[in-house]
Image (spheres, rainbow, N blue to C red):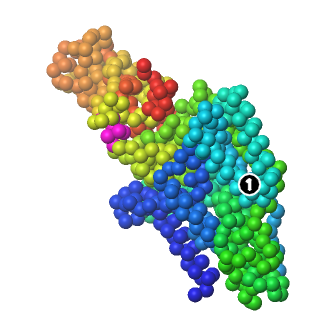
Amino acid sequence: MRIILVRRISQGFFLALFLWFCVVSSLGVEVWQLRGWPVSWFLELDPLVALGTMLTTGALHARLLWALATVALTVILGRFFCGWVCPFGTLHHAVGYLGKRAGTVRERIAANRFNARQSVKYWILIFLLSAGGGALLARGIRQGLGSSPVVWGAAAVCILVAGLALVGMGMKKRRASTVLLGLVGFWTAAGSLLAIEGMVAASLQTGLLDPIPLAYRSVSLVILPLADASTHLLSVDQRHYEGAGLIGLVFGAALVLNLKVPRFYCRFVCPLGALFGVLSRYALWRIGKTRGDCVQCGLCEADCEGGCEPLGQIRIPECVLCMNCREGCRHGVIGYGTQPSASGEIVSPSLSRRSALLALASGVAVIPTVRLQGHLGSSWNPRLIRPPGALSEDEFLKRCIKCGQCMRVCPTNIIHPAGLEGGLEGIWTPVLNYRVGTSGCQLNCIACGHICPTAAIRPILLEEKHGVGHFGPRGPIRVGMAFVDHGRCLPWAMDRPCIVCQENCPVSPKAIFVHEHYGTVRDGVVSVKRVSRGDVEFTENPFRPGDLATGDYYLAVDGAGLGSRSPILGNTAGGVTVRAGWVEALQPGQKLEVQVRLQRPRVDPSRCIGCGICEHECPVSGLRAIRVTAENESRNRRHSLLL
């Protein structure tokens, strides 16, 4: 069987598997819904996810151990993941193929030629990793000054890995050693003189451009909602996501650019591809010329997906193992084996020392600079409501890869990608929006924490969410608290009966309670014209028929107490109907009041969990009369309203 056909079968299989995992991330009991499928497997295979979380948290999450298998196979086979497994790369490959079908061989060779700007992806990789690793380095230096052997050992391993990475990116060994020693010396001096932990911060931003989270996010939040808009097989109603337009624009632009340059994203942007490029320097098997009698026909470069120039000195870090050069060579010169290419190899990315240091310094500095606005301190945004089980905001930003898995699995469609609510570093992280979707956060749903691949939203039990049993002393998990806006609430501001929020509150005992108040309605002072059994006719009747028949309106003797009040059973154009015995003492010309019973809602902060069902069901359209904010959330005691 032709190797190209095998590669296409592999790409098709993994793309179909990826799409299936996205589909079955919908909560339900059907075969096409979540029933134990390993829906985050591609994320767990992603070594950039594992490396990023290691740098930000100092630990490797158990579910991400799959990434070690990917690294091991890359060291053996080269960039196999890009050309044979990556679903996003497969889409690029397909679109690029459609774009070059009509081109001549010369045009295809020109389009596939290596471009020096392909080194940009290595800048992006260094920038993203250094944004996550600055705090770990600072903490290691500070603890290392205390002569901890474990910390010194971990620091030595990190320095060794960083040195190998710099060498893998093309820096000479002596220069790499000089750079590392200089940085470590500077950091050690700063750590001994300053409280350096307060000057740096860690935030996991690899998910912005990592192709696997990007593909999950785009398919789950854009492609599937569009595809399911008419059938509703995956969701009971049309799904909407804030910011989906921008996510779709990024996804679409990445694909369309392949019509200009094949695998544009893979060549110029992809940080995961850059990481694989560094690892492939040490690959045992690689593409190259098996002998030196090449006729220089150039056919090997006509369909090269990575721009690795197999005709001359092949660029090993850029080769995505598409095998097109091997298939296109009519003389059998191109092969795949353990021997170096007969025409020579370039095993290091085209990356200057200056650009690498600039990317490194920029990454370390960007997060502390962004956090100067204080969104993790006193200037925190109360509209930033995280799902139940989310870690404290600082720890959450160290783990969240913005994959959108929690948003897809949410049965009520209330988890959405954030905009600027949490600052620049919080873009596309999950936040709760109770106006969109079918309800609020359901009491018996804990799906988001169990699908999160990095435990940014930790898996919780229903007992913990409800605060019962062993978790009773800590109480239920609160994601926020509801506040009544007296200026928009119907009973408070407009003298209109409404207890929708109190009726729908799922907490027992209810977190929303009401205080009754009786007040005279507008134009509610009337005069008796005629009394007949239970019917009272008014001299002037300002009320439309049926308006007073809801059970919340009463007819009262002007100035009398509660005993002189009767519920209105119905009203017509002439008057109202009340209890027959109550009207016997009424006289023509007597003044009466039409009163309304208002049940004004109040919120008990000790019971409200911020589920948002009240906000979703509030009949006031637009800005709801009761709204949930992050005050009183469990994950941060500084946001508590209670002593």
Query: Measured along the vertical axis of the image, is residue 487 above or below residue 527?
Result: below
- Residue type highlighted by circle 1: Leu
For the residue pair 499 and 325, the one nearer the viewer reads as: 325
Residue 16 lies in the magenta-colored region = no
Q: How crowded is the residue under tag 1: few (<14 C-alpha within 10 Å), some, or many (20+)?
A: many
For the residue pair 543 and 204, the one nearer the viewer reads as: 204
Q: Residue furthest left?
A: 581
- Count all numbered tags in the image, as a single digit: 1
Q: Residue furthest top?
A: 559
**Residue 14 x %, y %:** 53, 70
Question: In the drawing, does residue 79 fall left or right of residue 490?
Answer: right
Residue at left 57%, top 48%? 53
Magenta residues span: 462-468
Main SS of residues in magenta: helix
Which image quadrant: the N terminus? bottom right
Residue 12 showing in the rendered view: yes
Which of the 4 quarters of the picture holds residue 545? top left
**Residue 582 x %, y %:** 19, 19
For the residue pair 193 and 535, the one nearer the viewer reads as: 193
Residue where numbered disc 1 is placed: 166
